[in-house]
Amino acid sequence: MVSSCTLCPVLLNDLMTRKFYITTPIYYVNARPHIGHAYTTIACDTIARRHRMLGDDTFFLTGTDEHGQKIERAAETAAKSPQQYADEISGEFRGLWKRMGISNDDFIRTTEERHVKRAQELFKRIRDNGYIYKGTYTGQYCVSDELYVDGAQPGDPCPTCGRITETVHEENYFFKLSAFQDKLLELYANPDFIRPEARRNEVIAFVRSGLRDLSISRSTFSWGIPVPDDPKHVIYVWLDALANYITAIGFGSAHAGAQEAFKKYWPADVHMIGKEIVRFHCVYWPAFLLAAGLPLPKAIVAHGWLLFEENKMSKSRGNIVRTETILDVLGADALRYFLLREVVFGQDGSFSFDALVQRYNSDLANGIGNLASRTLTMINRYFSAEVPYPSHAAAKRPADEVVAQTAAKVIREFGELFDQFQFSRALEAVWGLIATVDKYIVENEPWSLGEKHDDESRARLATVLYTSAEALRIATALSYPVIPDATARIWQQLGLGDIKKLDLTRLAWGQLALGTKLGDVHPVFPRADKSAIERMQKMEDHQRAPIVEEARDSAPPATPAKPQPAASVPADAVATSNGKITIDDFAKVELRVGQIKVAERVPKSDKLLRLEIDIGIEVRQVLAGIVEAYAPETLVGRKVVIVANLAPRKMRGLESNGMIVAASLEGGKPVLASFLEDVPVGARLK
Ligand code: MSP
């Protein structure tokens, strides 16, 4: 029996305040942040903001995933130490989130000591519970996804990203994943555990097909967390990364405060992820937690991809849109609103500057922005900036009641839809209310009523403006989590102070106090003209192609070509006085083994082929003037040498990112450099 008096306050507190813990995936530091990353972060930020407003004790975590072979190689390509490289890109993520006003409560980096120690603690727990053993792994590995590809043969592509897998043969620690098949299937019986339904079905099918034990350490490189008591091995980067969800809130710490935090916030209420990492989160992560004897997260929610020009936005495809461009031209709220309104959550959605500006103008500038400025300006003008009294019954009309009822319905619907992650529909409901009020204002013509001075017109005017302002207040309160900056300003203009202090659980029609003194009225969403699209496009083109040069690939050379290596030395590799370069100069040229995945002719060019070449860390688009020597179909699968650190160039409107090395023989056709032995993709030539 426990004496109740000491526990009472704690229990009461638990009953009164719910906790809410939400996480983003932690972002790899091999690529600078783009709007695909911003999408996940924005969705989580929006949910966290709503929960704070509902009074929940909310913890919102994000961070960066900094270990593993992929990062080690990316750092090498950038001629930096992995730590230096990780520091820079992690700093960019952190800086961008700050600039966007993201409300994360912590930012975890997997290279931080707190994470390293606690991740090792998790490994020990799993090992002490008997779920880890030593073995040898021989098989294929995708470095880009940091994924073991079961059943694949050398040369096979990764089923997730299509890049050619690498053969791995090394002594590893294995996790007894196979022991958890039944337990996992039981877990998936709860329909809320994996959302949406399609992803849940995918995971169930995968687990039903049988689980093999998983290698959870690597021993052929060192950029990772050493395995406790066996530092020749580093912990598999996915186990390291997934652990962030518990290490950040104090798991494995000896400090009482950290232990308390872990007890309070774990298990997570929502792990928000992109659909490509469902297996790691829905199969491996729960299995690791079960093995460690820890509680499981309540829900894993997978969203779709943001597409640009019909492909997943990603660094390797070179089709990313930087968030900063949109922030500079339209601001963070515009991007937040667009992504959550335009994309059906869970499905893929396309991004385009045209659609962004169109939405911005129709819903933000002409929608909530216009409703705010016209309503508040009229209250300023006709009622000396004080919320008017909606007057006596005689001035009421059924139309007023329609607005009030619509607002009450939208408050209910918005909450239900939002909590089911149906952000687009939730926003549609609020913008439905805005449209109803717009129509109401047009039909009741407050500007005409304002010109009349009889009592009845004055009373009617007060009712119309009160009704409009109250609907505006409700639309503003509901959309705060999505467009926090603009709604905070509208709230001030309504004379209501700090919007963050609003208790959303009590939001209802009729709470706008009569006589409230309005703040200064300023437009929150000025209209964007066509030049906004052009400006954003230009900013992005500029980023993508620092050197813009049209290929003169069909023009005859002015002088006969001399034999020369196709890979020219960069300008900063200065020759010494005797015409030789130093070894340091040579080291600046990054030559790598690449494998051609796609080869096709460039339209209207008689020399150029467009190649997609896997160079181990990513797939590059390279344009090569080799049409006369090679039919495109003969090149697919061939291993070639590419200069990987050449500045991108534009040819025939396409970006070429690197150069393929070939002997260029006088009067003859180019001959591609190749190898007699089998060499792994991505290997560096020194
Ligand atoms: N580091 C792993 C996650 C480890 S979590 C324990 C990883 N990182 S990532 O940087 O490649 O991707 C992280 C997330 O960014 C994706 O899951 C997804 O949420 C988001 N996105 C990256 N590109 C995206 C799009 N083009 N579209 C939508 N989301 C995208 O995977």
Image (cartoon, rainbow, N blue to C red):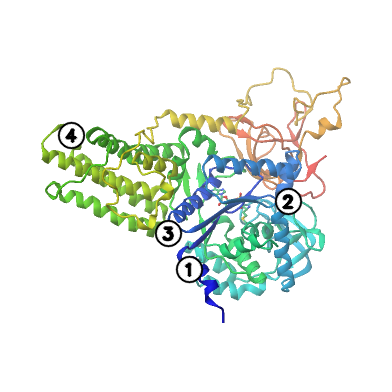
Q: Marks 1 and 2, how far apart in space?
A: 49 Å
Looking at this view, is 264 or 632 the one in front? 264
Disc 4 crowd, CA 10 A, few/some/many (<14, 14-19, 20+): some
Q: Is residue 433 left or right of residue 297?
A: left
The verdict on label 1 being within 8 Å of ligand 1 is: no
Decide which of tag 4 and tag 1 comes sooner along the chain: 1
Looking at this view, is 157 or 170 the one in front? 170
Disc 3 and disc 4 in contact, CB within 8 angstroms: no
In front: mark 3 or mark 1? 1
Disc 2 crowd, CA 10 A, few/some/many (<14, 14-19, 20+): many
Q: Marks 3 and 1, how far apart in space?
A: 25 Å
Q: Which mark is residue 69?
A: 2
Dot 3 amino acid type: Asp
Looking at this view, is 377 or 155 the one in front? 377
Disc 1 and disc 2 in contact, CB within 8 angstroms: no
Q: Marks 3 and 4, how far apart in space?
A: 42 Å
Q: Quadrant of residue 296?
A: bottom right
Residue 223 visible in rendering: yes
Q: Marks 4 and 1, how far apart in space?
A: 53 Å
Which residue is labeled 3 in the image? Answer: 419
Dot 2 amino acid type: Gln
Question: Which residue is most to the right?
Answer: 578
* SS state under label 1: helix
Dot 4 amino acid type: Gly
Decide which of tag 4 and tag 2 comes sooner along the chain: 2
Q: Quadrant of residue 260?
A: bottom right
Which residue is labeled 1 in the image? Answer: 12
Disc 3 crowd, CA 10 A, few/some/many (<14, 14-19, 20+): some
The verdict on label 4 being within 8 Å of ligand 1 is: no
* SS state under label 2: helix
